[in-house]
Amino acid sequence: MVTSVPRLVVAAPSSGSGKTTVATGLMAAFAARGLAVSPHKAGPDYIDPGYHALATGRVGRNLDAYLCGPELIAPLFLHGARGCDLAVVEGVMGLYDGAAGEGELASTAQVAKLLGAPVVLVVDASSQSRSVAALVHGFASWDPRVRVGGVILNKVGSDRHEELLREALDAAGVPVLGVLRRAAGVDTPSRHLGLVPVAERHADAVDSVAAMAALVERGCDLGALEALARSAGPVPWDSAPWTPDAAGHHPAPSAGKPAPVVAVAGGPAFTFSYAEQAELLAAAGAEVVTFDPLRDEALPDGTAGLVVGGGFPEVYASDLSSNEPLRKAVADLALSGAPVAAECAGLLYLCRELDGRPMCGVLDATARMTERLTLGYRDAVAVGDSVLAAAGTRMRGHEFHRTAVEPGAGAAPAWGLRSPVRRVEGFVRRGVHASYLHTHWASEPGVARRFVERCRTS
């Protein structure tokens, strides 16, 4: 069993320092040197892994200690890194920022410690010189179990500015592994929930990733960064790499019975999903088929169950509404009692309307855009039985949206939430389970098995 994957964690003192640019650029630059690079993202973010996948040619994977538990971080990392020469983990927020009120839980620092990985600190140096030493010293000494192996200085203004920064950091004892100047082409467009996903701007995204790689290649000591990655020893965990088969404890498929088709919404409007979800469905015996609700006018042939994850239906509300044949097919499937699992964007798509435009009408609810951002981790318990979970099943999830659904819960809610206030949320009706909550099925792999079993019998 290989547990000594060379690895780096790319962190920063705060959001907006340039983590995504540096991490994605490093992934692409190492891949251009012929290395098989495993891309990872700390936290619940769905969008950055799309850019990581472009940079490496491999699936971007998330490592979230809140959603999955600290005990799964190393196994999930080893699952993703299997067969790779090197792994790069992009952090979340500031190095020591985690779930609100939960100490270090779900922080980049915690992930680095669980993986035994050295940290490269990306510092926005645009408005400082000698003070950079105090900042870096503070981050490097705050937790002695976090090994800050080097610094990459971002947004450096001039040769003189670089000289002052290097002089200051010599005294701090943390090596400078890269200096990046401001560069055109590396910025990616943003909107109300962050970066625009790769699926919506693929050609431009390819150019952006190439620009990131060129910037990192010019400004960073890739040899020293690779050596730092190779200085990491075995991953400090006793278990084997996570596998969807072992996680779900799946029995052998019944002889002679065809695999039920589970249709999974994709395309530009529905880009939010964790790779392990499809892997768990397939391990449970499903044939997973992706379709695009913006273009496809019918569900895949033989669809026995439907999964509609997160994304940006509010951006594509007009086009989704115009695809009336597919809306009717989704409504008919739900009416038949077939299993349907919808998260966030999927919830909006199942409503009667979104911002006044007709949607699938599966739920007696309406959705609209608002100015209010709803964001945060949630502890959830299944209020009743559904196609995903038995009553009392506990899961952790994440909410991230600027929309509102009225009413917020049906007669049979999907979840009871504990924080930030106690409330019920979502809808369970026939075979439909619809909720704002994004969940990571690796934390409770029984949901995939239960869903596929219902697809077989519904």
Image (cartoon, grey):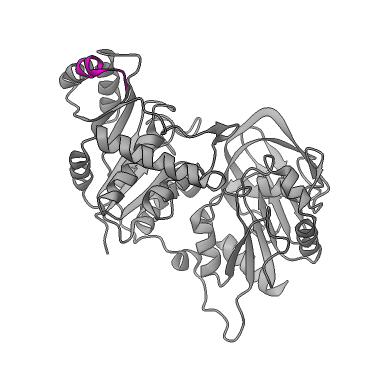
Left or right side of 231 for 102: right
Left or right side of 219 for 281: right
Residue 7 lies, with reference to residue 450, above or below; the image says above
Question: Which residues lie in the magenta part?
Answer: 156-163
At 54% across and 55% down in the image, what residue appears?
441
- Which corner quadrant holds the N terminus? bottom left
- Which corner quadrant holds the C terminus? bottom right
At 54% across and 48% down in the image, what residue appears?
199
Residue 426 appears in the rendering: no
At 40% across and 42% down in the image, what residue appears?
209
- Which of 189 and 77 lies nearest the eye of the viewer? 189
Residue 273 x/y as whole percent = 55, 51
Residue 386 x/y as whole percent = 70, 59
- Which of 36 and 274 lies nearest the eye of the viewer? 36
- Which of 266 and 41 lies nearest the eye of the viewer? 266
Residue 345 appears in the rendering: yes
Left or right side of 212 for 392: right
Residue 144 in which image quadrant: top left
At 58% across and 66% down in the image, what residue appears?
288
Residue 155 x/y as whole percent = 34, 23
Q: How many marks?
A: 0
Q: Is residue 217 magenta?
A: no
Q: Main secondary structure of the magenta part?
A: helix
Residue 2 in which image quadrant: bottom left
Residue 137 x/y as whole percent = 25, 22
Left or right side of 415 for 440: left
